[in-house]
Image (cartoon, rainbow, N blue to C red):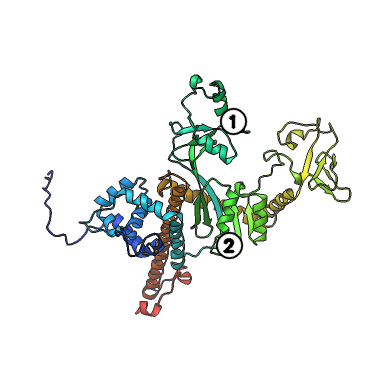
Amino acid sequence: MLGKKKVRQESLYSLRRRETRISRELLSVRKILDFGWFREACRDKFCDDNGRPSIAPEVLVSMMFLGYWYNIASDRTLCEECEDRLSFREFIGIDDDDDVPVHSSLTHWRQRLGREVFQKFLEHTIELAKKKGLVPGRCRLFDSTLVKAQADATGKATVLLDPVRDANDYLDALGEWQPADEPVDPSSGKKGGSTGQKRRNRTLESGRILRMNSHDVDARFIARRGKKPDFYQKVHFEFDLSTQLVMNSDAGHVHDAVKMRQFLSREKEPCDTVGGDTGYFTIDSQVWLKESGIESFISVRDNAANRGVGFGLEAFSRIEQEDCYICPKGLRLTRQNPESTGEKRYATPRNSCLGCEYATHCFQSGKPCARRQIGISAERAVVEEAKKRNQSHSYTRYTRIKIKRSITCEGGIGTMKNYGGLGRARGIGEESMAIQSAIAAGVNNVKKILKHLERRAKQAGKGVCELIRVHFFGLRSQILPSLPCRLDYGRLAA
């Protein structure tokens, strides 16, 4: 029989709350994460005894946490969810009769506190992981990613600027921004119409026009293979190899090697090994790592080779007595510049490589030239040392770190971008992007802590079941000798 729909009647008192998967999940998070530290972290941003009392800091930071935990990208949507869901209200600590803070309060708090306070949230999650038994190792992995900015490449806010280098010229150019989709009026009278158009479209040495967005001036226009040409913000992360925790995060269009040095300089945990892709390999970074006593397993881009199939310096035999090299064909590369210069240059005789069968594999362009030249400098020596270190006795370790980095960094960043609130920039500017990356990294660490506790509880449960099997049934397997936790066998048997 088809059932009838009952008329819903509000009850005067509710004796209990219905348990759901989300409520149980948030309860487990609440048991390990206390937001009381946030009050002390932002105390110096407010006056102690003057002015109107603000919203409780614990309420706002817990709301931000929920937005990243459930990948709610909009502050308006987050406030609506907190207004509607009882489990969210219980998590942030608001009674059923109280009003939820408006979405603009979240924006004001982020702008007022800055990235330093939210970096403390990331540090707080690392300390929490150490207390729960998830201790970071001594190897760090680095990676960066691009996040779509709050800027439209086809909108009227996108402008074309001259590549000026002087600060005064740049400030003057700010008043002459031209929307990219509007042509210059020849009758405008600015230096003859067509001259003004040519002046605005002057390109850089690489042939690229400098595009900027007046809505988000910190965003950078990037046209890269596999990505839609648009404005992006760059985010940097530092992972731990053993625990996959995010140790540091920041935003900014700076070189990867520079950001790696900044992360390692403020690192509080011991570190003696680093891993990264070729973007983190520079001469200065390698020298700094060596002076700091940190072993580097960073991939090396050999510019002297022809895209992986050419002959690098290792293909040439060195003769120390005659100060020359011998190529695979048997030709001699002799010294071309005097001893007083810093870089040593070696080359074969002129027109000796035109008919060589190895010419297409020996030159960077793949086209045979008149002769092959090799430059040996202090920078080249650092590159060769890194290549030998990666391919010598530590090759197995280098390969393992390289594979682990691909899983940890790319997998962790992909998870944060798809499910952890890092899919698109939520605010404007580099400061907002740094705050977003810090919260996303902290939420990712909390998820790692929960998985660690669940795994440890499962192992402990297996140990208890094994003890019952031993004491009551006389059966024994391989689980008992490797119990992960201490158990009182006498009390359990009793």
Q: Residues within 10 Å of mark 1 (few under 14, many from 20)?
A: some
Q: Which residue is mark 2?
A: 271
> Outermost residue, right direction?
322
Is 160 situated left or right of 63 in this image?
A: right
Q: Residue at x 33, y 54 (%)?
A: 63
Which amino acid lies under the numbered mark 1 shown in the image of this protein?
Thr
Which amino acid lies under the numbered mark 2 shown in the image of this protein?
Cys
Q: Which residue is mark 1?
A: 203
Mark 2 residue element:
loop
Instruction: Name the spot of residue 292 as percent of width and height, x first.
Output: 64, 61
Mark 1 residue element:
loop
Is 211 situated left or right of 96 in this image?
A: right
Depth order, front residue of 117/389:
117
Q: Earlier in the sequence, mark 2 or mark 1?
A: 1
Residue 372 higher or lower than 32, as above or below: above
Instruction: Name the spot of residue 87 as percent of width and height, x first.
Output: 27, 56
> Outermost residue, top direction?
187
